[in-house]
Amino acid sequence: MDKDATVFIIDDDKEVREAIELLMHSIGLRAKTYASAQDYLDHFNPDLPGCLILDVRMKGMSGLALQEHLNTLPLAPPVIIITGHGDVPMAVQAVQNGAANFIEKPFNEQVLLDSIHRALDVDAKQRGKALKKAEIQERLERLTRREHQVIEQVVKGERNKSIAKKLSITQSTVEAHRARAMEKLEAKSLSELMRIMISINPE
Amino acid sequence: MKSWQNIQGLLFDDFHDIRKHLLLQKRKYFTQQQYKVRSNPVYLPCHRLHGTEEQNFFSRKKKGIVNPGITIESEIKDGALGRIRTPDPLVRSQILYPTELPAHRTGGVAEVAYFPCFSNEVKGIIAHFSRLAACFHLLLVLLLFIPEITLADGTFIKVGVLNNQSMPDSEVIRLWEPTADYLAMKLPGYDFEIIPLGYYEVEAAVGQGKVDFILTNPGIFVSLAARNWVVPLATMNNVIGDESYSQYGGVIFTRSDNDSIQTLADLRGKRVAAVNEASFGGFLTAWRELHALGIDPYNDLFQLTFTQSHRKVVSAVLESKALAGIVRTGTLEQLLREHQLEQQDIKIINPMQSPDFPLVHSTRLYPEWPFSKVQHTNTILADKVALALLRMPSDFPSRFTGGYAKWTLPRNYSEAHTLFKEIKLPPYAFADTFTLSDALKRYWYWPLIGLLTLLALLAMVSIARRRNTRLEAAKQKLEYQYELIVNSVTDGIYGVNTKGQCTFVNRAMQHMTGWQATDLLGKDLQPMLHHTRKNGTPASTKECPMYESFRDNQPHFSSDDIFWRKDGRCIDVEYSSTPIKDRTGKTIGGVVVFRDISERKEAREKLQQHELQLSHVARLSMLGEMASGIAHEINQPLTAIATNSKACIRMLESRHPRIEACADVMEKIAGQAERAGEVIRHIRRFVTKDTPEMKPISIQTLLDAVLDLLHNELQRHDIKLSLNISHPNIQVLAQEIQIEQVLINLVRNAIESLEHKPAHQRLMEISTARKAENKLEIRITDQGPGLSTAIKEQLFDPFVTTKQEGMGLGLSISQGIIEAHGDRIHVDTLQQGVSFYFSLPIDSAQQQSSTRNGNLYG
């Protein structure tokens, strides 16, 4: 679990959000409270790891609407929905939207805490993946255009000879490009190169 | 005599004037009467009173007066002789020959008895003349003569003679008078008068009996004899030159320089002259010969001219007006003898040779003219006449004037008959040889007209038939449409007369009511269809809309009624009743159109039911919404409390618990608990604020509103409700809607409790009773299955119910409402069923007012 992980508490009821914040502090978790969905969005920082505790019925933007909005972002933090009048359709919608959990008020604090831990784990994993992807992307960008073309053919399984023919260059040039590209992508073998390429472009 | 001499000058002068006048007046003044004078012949020195005008005017053709041309021959004994021929019409005279008149003098001088006679009209006219005196004188003289005039002891025998030469009548008379004289001489007591007749007059004269004897040519004779109008007495023997002949025929001739005609057949297409179409020798004989050659003189000749005289025929040919001529035999010889014709000028066509007949002839020969007796003529007289004629002495002068030699026994005229038969002339126009083709040739237009008429009739018949077919089709179409309209509609239609008797029904009506048309027609429908009303009371014609229509002539409509079916069931109907009026606007019946609305009613009830359910659902969902809202409001502080306490516990369990912080949290928890309490209070306040105040309302109004709402439900469940309201106008203090809710609840519970009861046991009673000074008790009693003790104990607890779909809130809410009205709902379990009751406060104002009233009068 990331030490910087923060629990973002969004509830229009001050007492409730402060109580939850207190609970977070009591177990040593960092917490931030927001009175409305808009307030949260205004201070939203995608680089901050953590998860959301989101009340459904709020003035202004509802919890479910905020959840939907976050889903459009590349890196959405996990969301735990809490509600004072949970009904089935609402729960179904929330879970379909990818909610980590749906908890009715008043809740057992242990249930909430477990949910938070799971959500933070999920977030950390998401963030790790995203970081690696960004790194590879950065390495790819270091390749020249020619190196890029050569690597593309290599990934498709073409041999050096046919690559040279296709790109109308000599085979030795192909080999040179290939070696340089492997170096730049920090791939020690062909299989590693393949893994790197598939991780950024699964198809 | 001398006196006559005196008169006569006057007489004749006057005659001119009178005659002129009379001519102007035409002939209406002529008398038919004739006076005859036999004695005292008057010898007059007469003027020659000859004039064509008279003759023309009195032409027999015009009026058939067969007594014209009178020859007056007078002799002045002592002086000059004058011969006057005067066909004077005014002077109808009879020439009398004294018996002693010497025959040889006929050619010269005759003694004439002359007597003018006047009709009464003539007398009248005469009176107007200037010389009236003289006229009167004359008349006087005339009157003196009357006795002598009327002495006629003999009879006038009229002998008609064919004028075949179109001579003036006087000439004919001149020629034949000697013969008449001869007969008169031979037959004492008879006078014979010659009546000249033209070709066309003979038949009429004989037919009308205007003549007693007739001397005519064989042609006319045949046509008369065929009808048995005449019997021949003698045949005339003609004299040609010095010979006499008893037969004659026709001669067809042409100019000798004409080479184009050699035979009879050459006549075809030529110009031919003949005497007359009835002339025997001068036409008919030739016709027969031409006919034998297939020549029809009327159609096949270029021109056929009738000159009316034999001599004119000859001159026409000589003058080349005609190429050929037809005359009787002897004519040419006569002309030769008279040197009016030269032998070489002419040439005979088809000359024939016959023994004993030296004259030229071109045709067969036929007997000469017969002298015949007319049918009506006395046979004895006829015999005498015949004898006289046959015995006529050869030297008798009449023969010369008549131009004949003698009379012989009548010849056989069969050849003449044959002639007529051959050329198909009347009376043989339709002889047996008359064939169909002849008939067609002759009367072709009759069949044609007949055929055309037939065709026209056929056309008309066909048109009429087509019209008929179309009419029939149109009628059928109309009937079909009527059938279609009346019988295909799903609405029942029937007609009634003003007595309510059925006049027609449609198919739908039969189908709906189960009655057949035969059951209904002519019957009074009220007791069959409409005898009982919906609520079971008998219906009378008085309030029946149909009868209402008859009374006010207006259409009536009923939207909810019942008709009874044949099988005793009833159907819900809506119907309209419209009066039928005749042309004068008088109502003669009505037509009722009705519709089975059972299904519609059912559907409507279902819809109402559904709406009730929906509103129930809506109420529930509203309750749910509210509950949800309330839950949220309370959940929030609860959440805060629970979370804070847990946090606080964790804080206390930590290695370095901070008591102050924990105290803060505990403070928060208490605050939240208070907040929750505040929410509850707030809700209660909200509810209290929503409750309207109580108002006075009459118990009747309340019950009416409730029963209005539940009317359908009660009816559907077939529940008999009895109302027993003690004080309908009493005003109670109540929150109207809430009390209504309570009543609805209780009544509906009662309805449901009765659901499984048999129909006759579904009884419910609503009653009110004043219990105390200020309390009105309302009681709802049903005869349902009642309540078990267990149920009864928790009857008013919420969420306790005996119904499957119930929530168990009805009675608990109701109880709350009634408690708010200062009482409770009580339950009595009866032997059968349950009675729920509660009291409502009576409006104190009313209470006071009644008290005050009591004070006033007490």
Image (cartoon, rainbow, N blue to C red):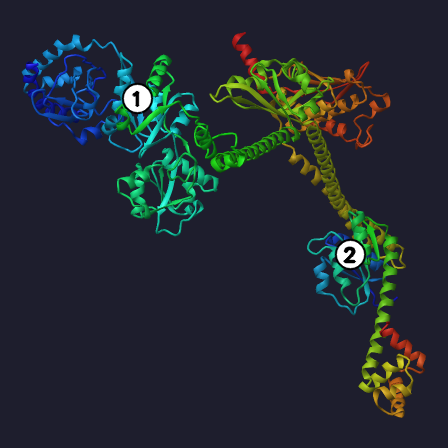
Please state the chain letter of the residue tagged with numbered disc 1 in the rendered image.
B
Which amino acid, mark 2? Leu
| Neighbourhood count class around disc 1 (C-alpha, 10 Å): few under 14, some 14–19, many 20 upward | some
Q: Visible in this render: residue B301?
A: yes
Mark 2 or mark 1, whichever is nearer to me: 1
**Residue B437's spot in the image, x, y percent?**
53, 37
Q: CA distance from mark 2 to mark 1?
A: 181 Å
Q: Return the x and y of residue B212 as percentages of the image width and height.
A: 33, 18
Count the labels in the image. 2
Please say whether residue B323 is visible from this viewpoint. Answer: no
Identify the secondary structure beneath mark 2: strand
Left or right of residue B543: residue B356: left
Q: Residue at x 65, y 28 (%)?
A: B487
Q: Is residue B645 above or below residue B329?
A: below
Chain ID at mark 2: A
Front position in the image: B696 or B485: B485
Which residue bears the numbered disc 2? A54
Residue B472, image x, y percentages: 59, 31
Q: Nearer the viewer, residue B723 or B196?
A: B196
On the image, numbered disc 1 is attached to which residue? Answer: B393
